[in-house]
Amino acid sequence: MGSILLVEDDRTLGLSLRIALGTEGHAVTVATTLAEARAVTEARAFDLVLLDLGLPDGDGLDLCRELRDSGDHMPIIALTARTMLQDRVQGLEMGADDYVTKPFDLPELIARIAAQLRRMTWISPTTDKTAVGELTIDFRSGEAWCAGEPVALSALELRLMRYLLDHAGAVVTREQLLTDVWELPAKSKTRTIDTFVYRLRRLIEKDPARPVHLVSLRGAGYKMVTGGGV
Ligand code: CA
């Protein structure tokens, strides 16, 4: 049960989703344009955003990127008629957490919403701040600092950090990251992991070119080294 922002210009679909999600106990706010969505997200917080990508005044992915840039880390599920894997990957790189292609199966969408809301609980355990290298993360609030300066991590970046820290000292393969963090097929050909690792290294490492915490092991995967390395 959460507060959901539904950004969808198809009013019939918007209404039926609002009713269906309301029945599940969610409080649903509907925006039909990017401009409306920007206005409501500036005014208040939501637990989750359902985001149609084809909107009359622009691409939903722009909103996705803006929300992440402004430090919002609520889960975002993109809704789209596009079915190409490339679009899915692009959506994830822009900070969406999941992707549902239209026409979708309502029970499946409801299950995915529930999974994302549960995951928010998972990335917000009762542990306090965790520090690795230059980066400090408060998983409870989702706040992060690089060398003492506040930085914004997306839900996916937080999830990736949580996963790497939970497996600190062990080798984590790309396949593990794809299936456990991205929830993509293990054989997906994507550079999205490299993009995220590159971004995280710039926050964690004193010298991102010579990482000592988020280490690459050629042909094997990655390893998070929390101690030492200073
Ligand atoms: Ca649309």
Image: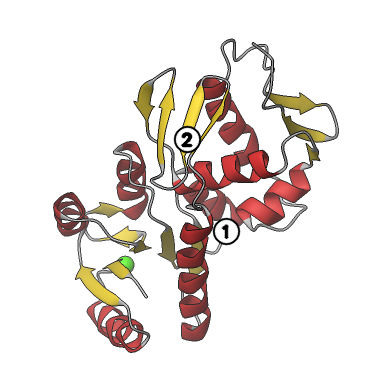
* Element at label 1: loop
> In the rendered image of this protein, does residue 94 appear above or below residue 119?
above
Q: Which mark is residue 84?
A: 1
Asked if residue 140 lies left or right of residue 207, the reply is left
Type of amino acid under label 1 = Met
Q: Residue at x 50, y 69 (%)?
A: 101
Q: Residue at x 50, y 62 (%)?
A: 99
Q: Is residue 176 left or right of residue 7?
A: right
Determine the image quadrant of residue 217.
top right
Q: Position of residue 230 (x, y in %)?
A: 64, 11
Say which element carries label 2: strand
Colour basis: secondary structure
Task: Give the mark, 1 or 2, whose residue is nearer the N terminus.
Answer: 1
Residue nearest the viewer, comparing 76 with 141: 141
Seen at 68% across and 55% down, the residue is 180
**Mark 2, residue position:** 137
Quadrant position of ligand 1: bottom left
Q: Quadrant of residue 143?
A: top left
**Quick check: 121 above or below 189?**
below
Q: Where, by quadrant of the figure, is residue 224 drawn?
A: top right
Query: Can you tell which of label 1 and label 2 is closer to the viewer?
Result: 2
Tally of marks: 2
Residue 78 image offset from top left, x and y in percent: 43, 61
Q: CA distance from mark 1 to mark 2?
A: 34 Å
Q: Amino acid at mark 2?
A: Ile
Does the Cβ of the disc 2 residue fall within 8 Å of ligand 1? no
Label 1 Cα crowd, 10 Å radius (few <14 / some 14-19 / many 20+): few
x then y, percent, for residue 133: 58, 20
Res. 179 in view: yes
